[in-house]
Structure formats: structure tokens, C-alpha cells
Image: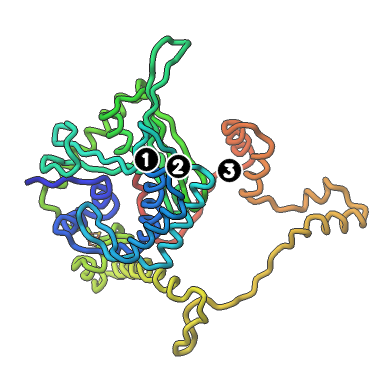
Amino acid sequence: MKLAYHPTTIKLHYNHCPYAVRLWKIGMPYDRSVFHTGVIAHAILEEIGKNPQEEPRVLADKVVEEYCSKGRSYDGNPEPPAPFTDAIEGAQLALNWHARYPVPNGPDIYHEHPFAFDQEWNEVDYYSPKARFRTLLDVVEIKDEYNEEKHRPYRTAIIRDYKTSWAATADELDSFQRKCQALVVWLKYEPDIIILEISNLRLRCNFQREIIVRNYTETLNHWKKEITLAIKTLDNNLNPNPGIGCIGCPYSPKCEHFNSMYSSENVMKRYIAAKEIIAKLEPQIRKAAKDKPPQTMSLGSIGYAKKERKKVLPSAQATLLTEWKNQEGTIDQLFQQLDLGVRTVEKIARILTNNKQDREDLIRRLTRMEQYSSFGIHKDKRK
Ligand code: SF4
């Protein structure tokens, strides 16, 4: 029987290496503890969406109780219970989000919508043995409306993806995962308009991208071909390619090829391996050290230590202006003395303009790009 792949499985190949998919295929376990907060936030939002008559806080408590005692099952694989602190954080994120953007409900609003397709892109049951591509979407809203001017009905599909990472912003709207989401909804519901949404629960911000399907049919077909090719590729025997892709790879603690890179004679390879080890360890150490005094070690300590730095007071602008005027200085002269940084320029440009295009034009007139030498590991950006 051939396997069904998820967008995240294909991304293992894109972002890490083919061997990571091989480890996924054999069910190699990896540390999923970083996902607890997000998983619980998602589960609560799903419950709120499916049970609008219930009190959200009561639903959140039920999810926390269940996930912190029994654990959960992901795609049929049982996962251990979540730590209480992560669960509480997840619940708070979900409830805060719901307070600001109430979770919608109704007949054409689907929470945790499963999609599965066979090799020829025919829709099949999510757990069908014929499934070759599977994905679960957080929220799908289908709206059928009528365009009075054009005298015809049209369908809009809103695809909402909840994110708990600070980093998930507008850039995420062009990601591979978004392509997969647009494709499956297009295939099943044939909408005229697709609205992709990234709902960042931490930032409490919604980012949107609109796709007018008639202008995008070629692109959607191209995405379909890209995923079909990825599925065919992943069916092969997959060889390792240790290197920069190991950074952030969930399998690095279990992968013998990573270990070989770590013990290699090549100093660059060892450096990459060391970076990945730190990337894995630092979040754990930060968590363990939070709200505790630094742990004393030989010649120092590790954890959070109090340090001093100079900060500009909120009253500094007014004080400076008063002092300047006291010495007969003009605002123009004061302005000449200020060092403008890119962030300040962007902030002022935002105030001076009414739309994105004008803002970008003004920023282009105020800034220039230059090359500089930046040391470190430079990972190719993959969408
Ligand atoms: S740790 Fe490196 S070599 Fe091993 S699976 Fe991940 S990316 Fe591939």
C-alpha cells in the first residue's frame, strides 16, 4: 500500500532532507513537546466553533483536562499528555483570540476540515487506503452570494489557519502549506474567490490574501503538478543529505547521519551540527530557567541574570525639545541632529501615507539597499 503524505511531510524534504521523510515513514518518534501550546489552542477553538451554545471557558477547561490527563491522538497516533503550563497558555491564547475575533459557526463553516485525495486527485475518505495526499484545515467557510451587477452567483471560500508562532505573519500567505490549502479547497468546493488567512493567536492579528480563481487557474494547476511530483518523489528510496537542512530538523537527535556530521573532521560541518544542537537545547534551557535564579556552574552560571542597560525615557523627546528651545535652537536645527534609522523612517512614512503603494514609494525615496557582510549559516528560503 502506498502512503498518504501531508504538506508537512513534503516540507520535511524541502526544508531538511529526503532522509527525514524516510524516518517519518518508519514512524521514528520525535519531540513534539514544542507543539503542546498550539495543539491545545487549536483544539479549544475547534470546540468553540463546533459548540457555539456552550460557554467557551467551560469548553477550554474540558480540553485542558483531557489533554493534560489522557493526551491526544494525531492521525491515529497516540501522543503523551501535555504539561499543565503549556495547556494553560494554549487556553489563554484561544480565549483571547475568541474574545477579539469570535469563532464563527454555521452550516457552511467547517472546523478541522479533513481533505484527502487519491493519486488522480479524486476526493477520498480521510483514512482511505487509496489516499495519497491528506490535510486538515483549521477553518473553512463557504459563502454563496449573488453579484447584482453581473447577475450571477459567486462562491467565496475562506481558509483560516491558526498560528501560535510569533513569526507567522503575512509571509506565511505564500508558503507551500498555503498552496496546498488553496488547492484542496479549490478542488472540492470550486470557489470563485479564495481568501487565505493567517490568524496569529499571539499577535492577535489576521493576515489575508485574496485569490481570484479565474486569474489563478493556471497557477493552481501548476501547484497540483508540483505536489503530484513531490508525492512520486517521496515514494522512492530516500537518501540522506546532511548539511544546513539539519538545522531545525525534528529528527536530528535520532539521525545517525547527523551524528556523523557532528563527529566529522570538517570544521564547517561540525559548526552546523553545533548550531543545530544549540537550537534544540536553548528553548528547553530557557523554559527550565524561567523565573528561577541562574544555576551556578564552575566559573559562572547559566540562566537568566539581571543586567543593566540604558533606555530612553518616554519623556526624553519633550525634555530635549525644551532644553533645545531654552538655548534658542529651532526645531529644524534639532531635526538636523537626529539620526534617522530605517524603523523610524518606516514609522513616519506610515503616518504620512494612506495606502501601501504610497508608503512603499515614499520609503523607496528615503532609503537605499546596500550589501554588507553577514557571518553565519545562510539557509535558503523555502516557501
Ligand atoms: S538530521 Fe540532517 S541528515 Fe538527518 S534527517 Fe534531518 S536533515 Fe537529514
Residue labelled with disc 3: 368
Looking at the picture, does residue 308 appear above or below residue 69? below
Q: What residue type is labelled 3?
A: Arg
Q: Which percent across, then down, holds residue 153?
A: 38, 16
Q: What element carries label 3?
A: loop
Query: For the residue carrying disc 3, how many other residues have a C-alpha within 10 Å: few (<14), some (14-19), or many (20+)?
Result: few
Query: For the residue carrying disc 1, how many other residues have a C-alpha within 10 Å: few (<14), some (14-19), or many (20+)?
Result: many
Looking at the picture, does residue 184 appear above or below residue 177? above
Q: Which amino acid does label 2 sit on?
A: Val
Q: What residue type is labelled 1?
A: Val
Quadrant occupied by the C terminus: top left
Residue labelled with disc 1: 139
The reply to whether callout 2 and callout 1 are in contact (CB within 8 Å) is: yes
Quadrant assignment for ligand 1: bottom left
Q: N-terminal of the two: label 3 or label 2?
A: 2
- Seen from the viewer's position, the closer of residues 264 and 248 is 248
Labels 3, 1: front one? 1
Looking at the picture, does residue 251 appear above or below residue 379? below
Q: Residue at the spot x=29%, y=57% of the render?
A: 245
Horizontal side, residue 231 vs residue 252: left or right: left
Q: N-terminal of the two: label 2 or label 1?
A: 2
- Seen from the viewer's position, the closer of residues 99 and 58 is 58
Q: Which percent across, then down, holds residue 236?
A: 11, 48
